[in-house]
Amino acid sequence: MKHHEERIVRYDSELKIEALRLRGIIQKFPNHFHEHYVIGFIESGQRKLSCKNREYRVEPGDLLLFNPYDNHFCEQIDEKPLDYRCLNIKPEIMREVVFEITGKPDKLIFKQPVVSRCEQVKGLQELHQMVMQEAGEFNKEEAFLFLLEQLVEEYGNWETDGDQPESDGNIEMICAYLEAHYQERITLADLCALTGCGKYYLVRAFTRTKGITPYRYLETVRINQAKQLLEKGLEPLETAYQTGFSDQSHFTNFFKQFIGITPKQYQKIFISNDPQPQGFRSRDEGSKN
């Protein structure tokens, strides 16, 4: 049975955050991470979520809190298509807002990815709707600040440079190599030559440390870089080429799998001459663009 899909993304230039809504979605999202914070909730449907190698059952009324680089994936576990809404906040914007609220210059870390039956979901729902409807700046900013104040107070923690655990030098070397050479064709043999480790040991050690395989890490880096190029107006075909994908079709499929919308749909929210420059709505667009 084909479900009616609606994929809406809107960028708020005043708050400098992105609002996303996925409605009627049944797709599985693979193991990946974002470079930004995600604050979200499910309006309907149930999902099995794995975040940082722990599993959760997520239902309507639960709050989702992902930190940058928290690896996670989810899939449908009931008959109802997913209706999901979230706000995406870049780390530098979060740091500025949290510093204004608390006076703390340290990095905010949410202590848990899922809060069951969370009372803050109502405030998040109202703020999300304001962004989608392009509400006035005054009321929207108040709602944003009050919501973050509550989330920071209830679920926030702080990370300074001294708090970060000592990491495996080989794993960090691999991450740095993937981030620097994502445009190139990279093989597992290349990573083994870099570290002197065997293939099996390297994959197991990397996955155990990062919660995501080296190849999935590379894919996520490529998608995050592609988002930045699309925001600057680069065409999807050229973006695919510059981020190491074999062709545009391969790129489009991966982008939609990770982000939930196509590259062209994502780009349209940042194009100033678009008839609706602050947002884009898609209905049943399949694999186009």
Image (cartoon, rainbow, N blue to C red):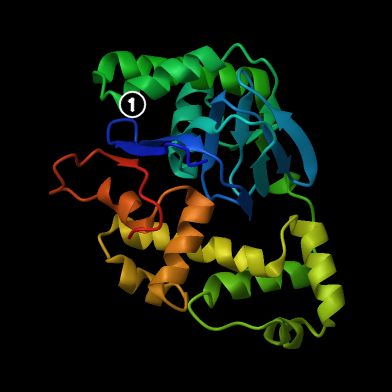
Q: Residue at x 32, y 66 (%)?
A: 236
Residue 177, can we see it? yes
Q: Is residue 167 visible?
A: no
* Tag 1 residue: 131
- Say which quadrant the C terminus sits in: bottom left
Left or right of residue 162, residue 148 in this image: left
Residue sitting at 53 percent across and 78 percent down?
181
Q: Is residue 273 above or below residue 6?
A: below
Q: Report the residue at 32% width, 42% height from top.
A: 282
- Percent of width and height locating residue 71: 67, 49
Q: Quadrant of residue 157?
A: top right
x and y percent of residue 146 in the render?
47, 15
Number of residues whose C-alpha sits closer than 10 Å to that of mark 1, classed few (under 14), some (14–19) or many (20 or more) = many
Question: Position of 37 compared to 115: left or right?
Answer: left
Which residue occupies 72% across, 64% down? 213
Q: Does 257 sit above or below residue 119?
A: below
Q: Residue 281 or 161: which is nearer the viewer?
A: 281
Q: Position of residue 115 (x, y in %)?
A: 69, 23
Which amino acid type is shown beneath numbered disc 1?
A: Val
